[in-house]
Structure formats: C-alpha cells, structure tokens
Amino acid sequence: MKKVQAFSKEFQSEMGWTISEDSFEKNRTSLLNNYMLLSTEVAEVAEELRKMFNLTYRSIEEGLDEDTAFEEAKAQVKDEIGKELADCIAYLMKFYNYFELDAENSFYDKMDEVKNRKNKDATNK
C-alpha cells in the first residue's frame, strides 16, 4: 500500500489534482469537492453491483441456474467494478496524502481496533 500511496501522491501532483492548501476556503472547497467525487465513485460501484444483480435475474428468467447466472454476471462486470474501485482508492489516497497519514498503518491499526471490539456482531461474514 505504501507504493500505491507514493505513486498516487506523485501522480496527483503531476496531474494537478492535489487538494488545495492555499487558504481555509480553498482547502474547504477542495476537500468537499474531493469528498463528493469519492462519493460519486462509491455510487458507481453500487451501479455495477446493481447491473450484476439485474444480469443475474435476467439469466435466471431465461432458464440458467442461479449459481451459473451469478458467476456469468460477475464476470461481465468485473473489469468495470475494478475501475470504479480504483477510482475510490485514488480519492482515498488524496485524503491520506493531504492529512499526511500512512494509509497502510491506518488500515492495520483500524483492523486491530475492529478485531478487539467488545460489541462485535456474532456472525460477521
């Protein structure tokens, strides 16, 4: 993840896509804009999932068994979901870099926190 974060920082700088740090208002506007863009990308992942489910249902209606229909639909959206998830990662890296956070350490720290929670769901699959 460190390589991805470093690449992202350099790439975003080259493209002029860094979060503005000129003033409070420019920071605020840039942060909110990037948050909205991240939200849009997350919604695009949801759209691909919806497409996958609709393709599955259509194939089932045409006589395909459920498991095969789902696997075929999953294969059809796989590349697009990968692209949308990559967009999400790019925007997340912008925030990590802006706040000078180590994405990898943050991830592992959070997973340790989750693992050690007392109020975990009993069946969390």
Image: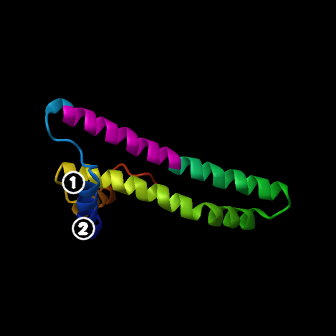
- Disc on the earlier residue, 1 or 2: 2
Task: Identify residue type, mark 2.
Answer: Lys
User: From this viewpoint, is residue 109 visible?
Assistant: no
Q: Residue 82's x, y, as percent?
A: 49, 62
Q: Residue 9's x, y, as percent?
A: 24, 59
User: From this viewpoint, is residue 53 visible?
Assistant: yes
Q: Which residue is mark 2?
A: 2
Residue occupying the far right of the picture:
63
Residue 38: say if magenta.
Answer: yes
Decide: few, some or many residues near mark 2? Use Cα within 10 Å; few <14, some 14-19, many ≥20.
few
Q: How is the image coloured?
A: rainbow
Q: Which residue is mark 1?
A: 97
Q: Quadrant of residue 22?
A: top left
Q: Which residues are magenta?
A: 26-44
Q: Residue at x 78, y 58 (%)?
A: 59
Q: Residue at x 40, y 53 (%)?
A: 88
From what the image shows, is residue 14 above or below residue 19?
below
Q: Residue 13's x, y, as percent?
A: 23, 55
Task: Identify residue type, mark 1.
Answer: Asn
Q: Residue at x 26, y 50 (%)?
A: 16
Circle 2 SS class: helix
The answer for how far apart the CA atoms under marks 1 and 2 are is 11 Å
Circle 1 SS class: helix
Callout count: 2
Instruction: Residue 38: give its label.
Output: none
User: Looking at the image, which is closer to me, 43 or 122?
Assistant: 43
User: Looking at the image, which is closer to me, 35 or 25?
Assistant: 25
- Which image quarter is the N terminus in? bottom left
Q: Residue 32's x, y, as percent?
A: 30, 35
Decide: few, some or many residues near mark 1? Use Cα within 10 Å; few <14, some 14-19, many ≥20.
some
